[in-house]
Amino acid sequence: MDTSTRGSASVPLLDPRTGRVRGTADAGREGEVAEAVAAARAARPGWGGLTPRERSQRLEHLAALVAEQADAYAQRECAGTGKPVDEAAGEVAQVVDLLRFYASAVRAQLAPAAGRLVAGHESWVRWEPMGVVGVIVPWNYPLLMAAWRCAPALAAGNTVVVKPAESTPDSLELLAEHAAEALGPGVLAALPGDRTTGRLLVAADVDMVAFTGSGAAGRDVAARAGTRRVSLELGGNAPALVLPDAPEDTWEQLAAACTYNAGQSCAAPARVIALQEDYGRVVERLSQAMAQRLAGRDFGPLNNADQVARFDRIVTTSAAGHSAVAKVAPGPGEEGGLWRAARVLADLPDDDPAVLEEVFGPLLTVQAAPDIDAALALADGVPQALAASVWTRDVAVGLAVAGRLNAGEAWLNCHLVQTAELPHGGRGASGHGTDLSVLALHEYQRPKTITARLAIGPAGHGG
């Protein structure tokens, strides 16, 4: 065993707004991982044995605690991510809503298949919890992505050990404290740490792994998990098909969606595709709209030094013939933060790194296509297939184009519009599995079929 997996370790915590170290966090190793998983294993029979109503009541209690301490959660999110407080507060509100949604959904599941499906026999299908779920979430939405994973897993009767990204442990540590009060000891534990911690969690005695993060890391998780169930959300590179009759507010809508959370959203618009006849106007209007979005005023910094280096590499190696760059407006004392301006890159070859890679920053590329079929080919021409949008006043055309896109989620004349009731999930290199909606409950359950012979003879033989 590598000695890096033993003993205690710590990681520095950076404030993305200032670029300065704000503290350190412990990084779990073999002992901490084993302890958290063992506690979850011990808590599983009691938690899974509760009735749906009882689990629902406890999840409602947890939602109430989060709502009562919403300001504290928002401040912790801001400390780790650097995002504006209004963004963080809105995401905390979504977490409360998710907990309450799954508290209700678990009591209203669709009835499983049952009945006399074979002559002389009665059958039932039971949906049972997987057991202990190891959850690994990224740094772009530390609390919200944890809620997307943990809320349905808990509602389905599993216990959970969740590892936040090493740069953003703050809000999940508070959630674990409230979960111990509302749900019981060991039902939901936070395990701060780095990549080594995550690998140890995947290798531990967990029954399932739910991972949200990069494609490379997801493939590593899947390889290490072996035959255990793995749910993967591995990011996107979302196209936005803008037709010549797009609504007048298309440009502002795309600029706002692209810069929300500094563009660090898996489903954010990234690749604008216009028809050749309208290409010049689209570039001009998008450039104008993105120029109005200022880092430090309208959106936060990038999260960490690695992400900054990756963003800068992609931008500087891009073969862009046209580049529009907005300004940066950090607050007093934040000039050294990880701020990057909103950008539009146009006149790119279709194999440019800024097109093919998930940039994960406040950047829009613009490509041209001769017709809608060619635009769809460009949209589907990257490995990721998570989300997409179509922009046109002709709703019938828009719905037809959206239906042809290879994406798990598609929007018409909007982008990043999501709610707990609607499923979200990727295809291709964007992973597999379902977040959100009642469908996510089955992500963390497995079916058991029970079939009984109805007639039995006097000596135990069939009659």
Image: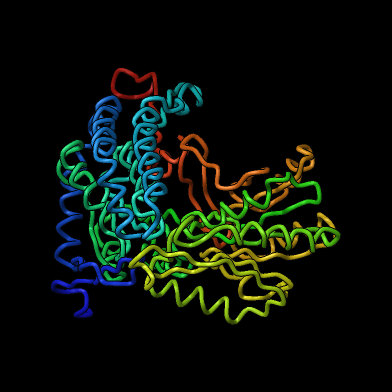
- Residue 126 or residue 243, whichever sits in front: 243
Image point (37%, 50%), residue name: 85
Image point (35%, 20%), residue name: 456
Residue 267: quarter of image: bottom right
Q: Quadrant of the C terminus?
A: top left
Residue 200, x across and y down, in percent? 26, 66
Residue 231, x across and y down, in percent? 43, 53
Residue 163: quarter of image: bottom left
- Residue 294 or residue 449, whichever sits in front: 294
In the image as oriented, which residue stretches furthest toward the front? 332
Q: Position of 459 compared to 280: left or right?
A: left
Q: Position of 236 compared to 261: left or right?
A: right
- Residue 341 or residue 14, whichever sits in front: 341
Q: In the image, is residue 64 above or below residue 288?
A: above
Q: In the image, is residue 39 above or below residue 3?
A: above
Residue 413, x across and y down, in percent? 67, 43
Residue 124: quarter of image: top left
Q: Quadrant of the N terminus?
A: bottom left
Q: Position of 99 compared to 287: left or right?
A: left
Instruction: Name the colour scheme.
Output: rainbow
Image point (46%, 70%), residue name: 216
